Amino acid sequence: MRNHLKSLAAGLFGAAFVGLVAVSPASAEVPESSDPIKLAINEWTGQVITTHIAGEILQRMGYNVEYTTAGYLPQFEAIQDGTVTASLEIWSNNVGDAYTTAEATGNIEDIGDLGLNAGEQWIYPKYMEEQCPGLPALDAFIACADQFSTPETFPNGRLLDYPLDWGARNADVIAAMQLPYTSVPGGSEGAMVAEFKAAYERQEPIVMMFWTPHWLYADVEVGAVDLPAFDPACESDAAWGTNPDATGDCLYEQPTTFKVAWSGMKDEWPAAYRFLSTFTLEAEDQIPLISKVDAQGMDMDAVIKEWVDANEAKWRPMVDAALAGS
């Protein structure tokens, strides 16, 4: 991402930068530190876009920003010691104990909701409802396990799952519900999407754990397996659900998305900390950007710059409040 501060006098955004910092005599003077704010980059495009939008705005505020590739679960250790400053798209039901353990140290903190209207489900191509009558009902999904199988999983069906370092919740759900399926981790977001689209084009069976918001839903018609909806009793009462001998026999709680930061950030870069604490991004904004990058092959930097330029009305109030100290 280009640093627009390198040529303020001649740069396209010089005037915008002056307008941002010159709020009032009581406004924060930024940057409070020239040290880089290091933002975590995880393995899916939506997170990368979220992070680069926030980073672009921070750069326009005057901050030195670096992007650091970090594994989704390992990043929490890096944030604790300040090696990474913040991570801006954490999915609440996909962190296991990693975040809870990190938060207990006092060195990492939740800095507020991101605001995406997020969700997760097991999806399959809509044409499978002809090949497996009864879908999306769970009974039909169970009966058609052999249709969803591969030589490696037969007679079990194959659930294309998240990469291993995103957690392994589906293996637990499959075991608790005693489903004739095997969770097989995907290699990455891109690999999962490519495999699903290839199967879709060949009209082959496939079922995959996936999330929204994502551009894939604009390209393919899918159904979702009708798993028992999450209920708190599912996690604590074995009598609840399909398996009287186990808890966890239901779909997991649907996620919220939030942001986390190193606890020292608020002291070293207080205005940046206030901005990231209030920064939000809606799914309606993120999905078209994901499509431009992943489906249309547009340059990430160009896509981010275009959005930030066109949506100052959305982010400017957050910046003004952060600079004013509120």
Image (cartoon, helix red, strand yellow):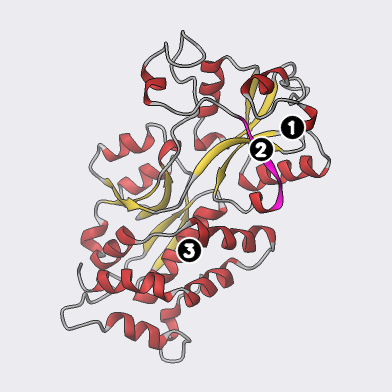
Percent x, y of residue 203 = 82, 39
Residue 229 vs residue 56, the one in the foreground? 229
Q: Tell me if mark 1 has few (under 14), some (14-19) or many (20+) residues whose alpha carbon lies within 10 angstroms of its own.
A: some
Determine if the magenta segment contains residue 52. Answer: no
Residue extending farthest to the front is 134
Q: Which residue is mark 2?
A: 223
**Which numbered tag is attached to residue 99?**
none
The part of the chain drawn in magenta is 219-225
| First reached walking from the N terminus: tag 2 or tag 3 | 3
Report the Cα–Cα distance between label 3 and label 1.
39 Å
Percent x, y of residue 260 = 34, 50
Question: In which quadrant is the C terminus drawn?
Answer: bottom left
Q: Is residue 161 left or right of residue 322?
A: right
For discs 3 and 1, the disc positioned in front in the rendered view: 1
Q: Which residue is mark 3?
A: 52
Q: Amino acid at mark 2?
A: Gly
Q: Is residue 107 left or right of residue 254?
A: left
**Where 127 sits versus 212, above or below?**
above
Report the Cα–Cα distance between label 1 and label 2.
8 Å
Name the residue rendered at 52%, 14% in the picture.
Answer: 242
Residue extending farthest to the right is 202
Determine if the magenta segment contains residue 222. Answer: yes
| First reached walking from the N terminus: tag 1 or tag 2 | 1
Image quarter for residue 187?
A: top right
**Where 72 sits versus 10, above or below?**
above
Name the residue rendered at 32%, 68% in the picture.
Answer: 318
